[in-house]
Amino acid sequence: MTSTTVAERSNLEKALLAFPPYWPIEWTRQIRQRGLRLPLDWMSYVKEAAAITFPDKPGWVTPHTVAFETQTMWLRDFSDADAPSDAIPVIIDAPYAGHPSTIADYADGQSLVQTLKAGGAKRLYVTDWKSASHAMRNFGIDKYLADLRDAVDHVGGRAHLVGLCQGGWLSAMLAARYPGKAVSLVLAGAPIDTHAGSGPVTKLAKRTPLSFYRSMVAMGGGRMRGRFMLQGWKNMHPDEHYWGKYVDLFDNITNPQYVNRARHFASWYEHVVDLPGRLYLEAVKHLFKLNRLARGEFVALGERISLKTITVPLYLLAGADDDITTPEQVFNAENLVGTPRDQIRKELAPGGHIGLFMGAKTLKEQWAHISAWIGQQK
């Protein structure tokens, strides 16, 4: 058997794994709609179904360098070559919740990095969180907070912090623990008051015993495996991830733009990063179960911190249909910080959680507002 034949067989086996069990019914429907075109469309579908089930690894879109590296992250530098050295840097603190940090630079025309640069951010950095190795399994929140602090120090000691999702509570912790390091603070889809509202993640965290999360970490050898988290995210919308995306792909298989978008999204969504077990369990217990950050009871790097110590200008962005971080969890931050009300901006964007960070319309509208706002803060 030739190597080419082996490769073709491997791809076919992968494609077959992607087929949901409803295909006999779907096949009958498609015969009526497509007629003689169906065999050719089917061959294209087999290839593309395999591609979105076993996609290539995502990459960064915008040219950059690595400015700084710690055990937990690469600080990626997207600054303009002629950026003034005294310009206050902007740091996008990317989510660390099982998916790659490339969501901050998702695609050409769908990039938060590009939006902020176009809005005037001359010095711009992104935290690219590393997938946790076995040696990192005992890293806790303090380690990540210290590394974010060191990253700010590396770029001059002060920065505009833009916290996305889980990166939001870490950025808020830094602003509270080290007043003066944050010049302004943007919290987008960030779970700050985790007991506000009644979203599914909040309900799950409250009713699920901590022993369950410990068992998941034990199964991962001391880490919370990204594949476990991905399964959990998918199970929130099983019809979409186990059925709908394949139906939609087949219905649009003759549309190259749709197929390319599906491939690109899968390259980000299906590739996962692992989290240290200690970090994960600390977040579940202290932030989501006990809500200690919002209550002013969380101890960070040896000191109890209060969000009231945050007095810098604050911008809060939430998704109207976000069921990962509900708007209440984001917007209630205005009642917890010490920032004067006239220096707090709130905006509700249409759509769900992921679209907050890479949706074309949200980037063009809400993030353009945020970019202009950051430029006004000194």
Image (cartoon, grey):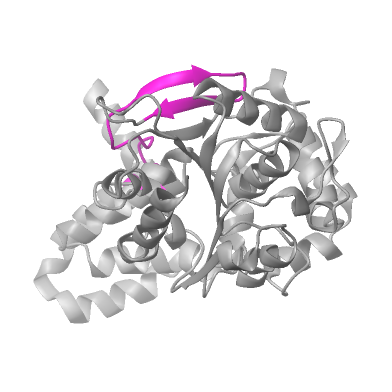
What residue is rendered at 62% in x and 63% in y? 325
Magenta span covers which residues? 51-77
Image coords of residue 193 (percent x, y)? 74, 62
In the depicted structure, whether residue 207 falls above or below residue 140: below
Q: Quadrant of the N terminus?
A: top left
Q: Quadrant of residue 243?
A: bottom left
In the depicted structure, whether residue 321 falls above or below residue 372: below
Residue extending farthest left: 36
Residue 46 at least partly seen = no
In the depicted structure, whether residue 294 falls above or below residue 128: below
Image coords of residue 296 (percent x, y)? 85, 53
74 or 343: which is nearer to us? 343
What residue is rendered at 41% in x and 21% in y? 66
Residue 242 at least partly seen = yes
Count of numbered badges drawn on the protein:
0
Please say whether residue 259 is one of the residues in the magenta stretch.
no
Image coords of residue 312 (percent x, y)? 61, 50
Q: Quadrant of residue 22?
A: bottom left
